[in-house]
Image: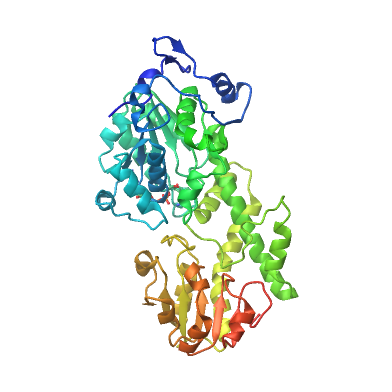
Amino acid sequence: MPQGLGNDVVGTGVCVHRNKSGCPRLDPGHELAYHATGIVMNILVRQPTRGDEVEHLEDDASANPWGYNLNICMIGAGYVGLVSAACFSEFGWNVTCIDKDPARVASLKRGEVPIFEPGLDDLLARNIKAGRITFSDDIGPAIVASDIIFLAVGTPMRRGDGHADLSYVFSAVADMAPHIDGFKVITTKSTVPVGTSRAIEKRLRELRPDADFAVCSNPEFLREGSAIQDFTHPDRVLVGTDDPRAMEVMERLYKPLGLRGAPVMFVSRESAELAKYAANAFLALKISFINEVADLCEEVGANVQEVASAIGKDRRIGDKFLHPGPGYGGSCFPKDVSALVRTAREARAPLSIIEQVQRVNDERKIAMAGRIERALGEGISGKTIGILGVTFKPNTDDMREAPSLVVVPMLVERGAKVKVYDPEGRANAEPMLPGVTWCASASEVASDADALVVLTEWNEFRALNLKAVRKVMRGGVLVDLRNIFNAKDVVAAGFDRYDSIGRPGAGN
Ligand SMILES: NC(=O)c1ccc[n+]([C@@H]2O[C@H](COP(=O)([O-])OP(=O)(O)OC[C@H]3O[C@@H](n4cnc5c(N)ncnc54)[C@H](O)[C@@H]3O)[C@@H](O)[C@H]2O)c1
């Protein structure tokens, strides 16, 4: 496999290329880049321009239009690792995806994608066929061949103290250490607490004092359900590094996005790490804010959708993440909010607002079960409740921290017969939601139900024929925790009671 940058990076901290006649030269634009290491500028927003080609790798350039090649080792083939690997291979880079889970690697080798993410199967199939992406559980050869090593392993919430569990990260670091030969850029794509990149560097220096590498931070902002679009059209790419060689490699890596106009921002490692947590905490705060405003709307007769669209028109506020619902869940917000709260407390700069967001969200999920119970009137024991959607959001099969994991067990515990349908979530959800009956469609869930509850706003639920749904139900209660219907249509379809979030209407 052709080596990408290794042999062309010489000296300490200065990046030199050789042109065709063998004379060393600095890559255009790099004076600027060196300033970004902190001497002159703290933040560099650099958009590479066409013509900024690198001559020294012309021989390897046949596979892509960029004039050079890059070899990437992606450690972790989950939501982030797989999507990032597929998109990097689509840019033209060679990617080897490593995962510890042999079943996952085997299924990927068979061309089966182990997660549901719209468009990912086609993207992977195309790049597997083109020979740009391969899968393995043998980390050694992939590390040896790589210019860039990404850590995209999980960083779940640690039991007990709510901090980020970094055991997967450091286990991957230990796995890669013996194989590092030549200069490698090691990059955390996993969401890791501030200081982790430095800690990885320290650990690697202990394990391999002889090795040549730079550790940088490149947090990922993609959202499940629209991950490919988010990766290929990011609001920004954030790279934390103070190493000029790593900066050059990362610039080359993201050149395809830079040429499209995506800002590629170079900041310190600490800023990059903290920015990821601050972004998620801010978005979680927006959700909890609108959820509390929705509760207030119900008490005072306002409509949260009108309020949200009025404040959202203010560009200082923006209209995103102002949709009330049953509380945020998913693989990121709950654990990242929790980890940030821990980091802030340890740094003696507590984020009291974010601590409150965490409490508001936990209580909200519990309150949703009470809301369903109230809608049904005289207790839910023996009543049949149909649940539409259990994943934490639509267009994913991810169940991590989904509100359904709080709401559904509470209904079961209180004696309800719970029927469930989700377009993609069943395989992951079934072991997590004991005591429920699984159905193959929305109409099967509705059949003989006393109440129907929308927990996840899959598009197919928006398109339901409410009259037909009401006809097969025993009772006439619809609890819409995502506000996908409107009261007029629900009442016209023959329902007796419609509960939604923060809006006037039947039931509220
Ligand atoms: N899921 C998202 O939407 C999202 C978005 C942005 C950032 N992130 C962050 O990205 C990271 C990964 O998240 P995810 O949702 O992709 O996780 P995931 O659980 O879906 O995938 C992690 C993968 O890493 C593998 N793995 C664990 N240890 C390994 C090792 N030592 N070597 C090789 N493989 C190993 C696991 O088998 C698993 O397949 C987390 O830090 C997360 O916070 C996630």
Q: From what the image shows, is residue 395 above or below residue 263? A: below
Q: Please tell me which residue is depicted at 43% across the width and 35% down the height of the picture.
A: 187
> In this view of the protein, which residue sits in the foreground, 270 or 298?
298
Q: Quadrant of the N terminus?
A: top left
Q: Nearer the viewer, residue 167 or 267?
A: 267
In the image, what residue occupies the spot 56% across and 37% down?
261
* Residue found 58% across the figure and 25% down from its top: 36
Q: How many marks?
A: 0
Q: Position of residue 155 (x, y in %)?
A: 43, 48
Observer able to see residue 356: no
Using the rendered image of the protein, determine whether residue 289 is visible from the camera's viewpoint. yes
The residue located at (39%, 71%) in the rendering is: 433
**Left or right: 150 with respect to 105?**
right
Viewed as shown, does residue 272 lie left or right of 131? right
Quadrant including the C terminus = bottom right
Q: Position of residue 316 (x, y in %)?
A: 72, 50
Q: Please tell me in which quadrant of the rendered image residue 29 appears.
A: top right
| Location of residue 78 in the rendering, given as x and y in whole percent from the top left corner | 38, 50
In the rendered image of this protein, does residue 389 appear above or below residue 221?
below
Horizontal and vertical percent position of residue 252: 46, 29
Left-right relation of 418 to 288 = left
Q: Is residue 97 above or below residue 4?
A: below
